[in-house]
Image: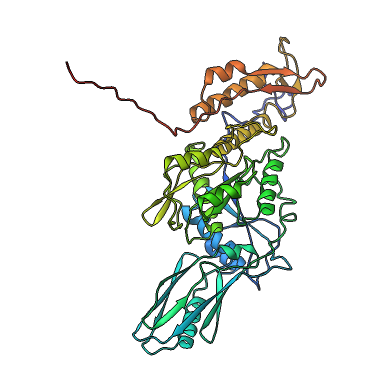
Amino acid sequence: MSIGFTLVPSGAAASAVFVEQENVRRGVPAPLQHKVLLVGQYNSGFTPTDDVPQLLQDVADAQQRYGRGSMLALMAAKAFASGGVGYDVFALPVADDGSAIDADADVVISGTATAAGTIAIVIAGVRIATAIASGDAASAAATALTASINANLDLPVTASASTGTVTIAAKNGGTVGNQIALVLEESPAGLSLTVPAALTDGANDPSLTSAFADLGDTWYTEAVCPYLGDTEISAFEALGVARMDPLVKRPLLTFVGYTDTRANLITALGDRNSEFSSFIPVHGSPTPAFEIASSFAGMWARHHAGDRVGRPVVGNTIPGVLAGTGNELTYGVRDTGIKLGASWTRNLGSGVVAGDTATTRTETNQGVATDAFRFAVIIPNLQYKINAADITFGSSPFVQAVVISDDVAAAPAFAVRPKTAKAYAIQLVDDWVNRGLTADRDGVVDGITAEIHPTNAGRINVLIPDIPSAGLRILAAKIEWDFLV
């Protein structure tokens, strides 16, 4: 094969030393850079560009852009909790719906403190302690508690007091405020507090149509859906389908947090059936669901960066998420749930670790049960392979090439045969095997075919019959024994 030059003249005769350079990819592409997309609202008085993704530098950057205690600032804090190493965090700001209703709740205080003490209320997983003096009446206690709440700018709520009642309201409108749990931990003698379990009555979330209209060429590998409504979750799932299109080649996996009971989770899954959505339950946790999803997405992205791509996250800590009270599940419950598309997590002290991460895809489009996308880890496996194939076949020698058949004996350097494409496909498979992403090297390689399209002379079709590796989840051992006779 002759060496092809682009700039060196082929007919040069006079003495000279020509040095031409060209970037040519050798080997396989580097691992995909994971990018987490946080979709959420911002505080009143802030003016980010709506529906346009913005790369975040750190938590302080998110607070400055969207306001402390805003959905996006709190989501960013959780997404960065895994260190931000090996992945990027983007925010996609959406404005409150014009008819949004803020969730709220009334904490009712009565009586008079007969001894000095503390009112301690946990709001969205954050403990707020207020000192109360002996003799303080309900109105004084309400005023003091209101001041304590408003002093913490990173809470997702504000408070106001009126004659012994503290009204706690979400900073952002819509149903997300209903995720904010309230827990009374202690109160002084003589004072009686009635504390609802959570804020309620938040309604009317933003439409995501404009937000998802043009995400451009950036590959967001993980997304966080902060909403629990069917409409919003379905919009994320539809986005996943759109991003999987063969021309887009940017599949993403959406995480949805969940804190209600296991039974209600199974009900919530309903007829949901998507390989692009995964519910992360921490039953009974005071941490808002949107923060759980954000923390999990950051952990997931960091885990699958570098040489851990495609490996299960079982046992990884979900940073900053508080344990629930109903999260210890029997094996039977976990096993049944996984088959229905329900992930599980486990309490570990005051924190939470990941269990099996499932997608909601349980049936084919024809309604036949399938386990092909049962575990979400298949998505980063495919993301890596799609990225590698895209880069490989979109680079030299396939750029500006011409197609010739395999039986042509001599050809210029810019000519590509089907067997050339097959050789590069084998190189890809070898990389996948070395990374533990493909289970049977010989079987896959033996099945690779490449051919010129029968009716399009400028097209080469390549088939790679991949066999993805599966994460080790079950090890069954049997011990046989008997007494000596």
What x and y, as percent, mark residue 250? 66, 41
Q: Which residue lies furthest to the right in this view?
A: 455
Residue at the spot 55% in from the left edge and 50% down from the top edge: 265
**Residue 283 horizontal side relative to residue 39, left or right:** left
**Residue 39 spot, x, y in % from top left:** 63, 56
Q: Residue 178's spot in the image, x, y percent?
A: 58, 64
Whether residue 88 sits left or right of residue 420 in the image: it is left
Tell me: residue 161, above or below residue 242: below
Q: Quadrant of the C terminus?
A: top left
Q: Residue at 41% across / 87% down in the picture? A: 112
Task: Give the percent coordinates (x, y) of residue 459.
Answer: 77, 23
Does any portion of residue 139 appear in the rendered image? yes
Q: In which quarter of the image is the N terminus?
A: top right
Q: In this view, does 40 lie above or below 28?
A: below
The relative height of residue 146 versus residue 102 in the rendered view (above or below) is below
Query: Measuring 58% from the left and 38% from the top, which residue is drawn there?
Result: 379
Residue 22, visible in the rendered structure: no
Residue farthest toward the left in the current orientation of the protein: 485
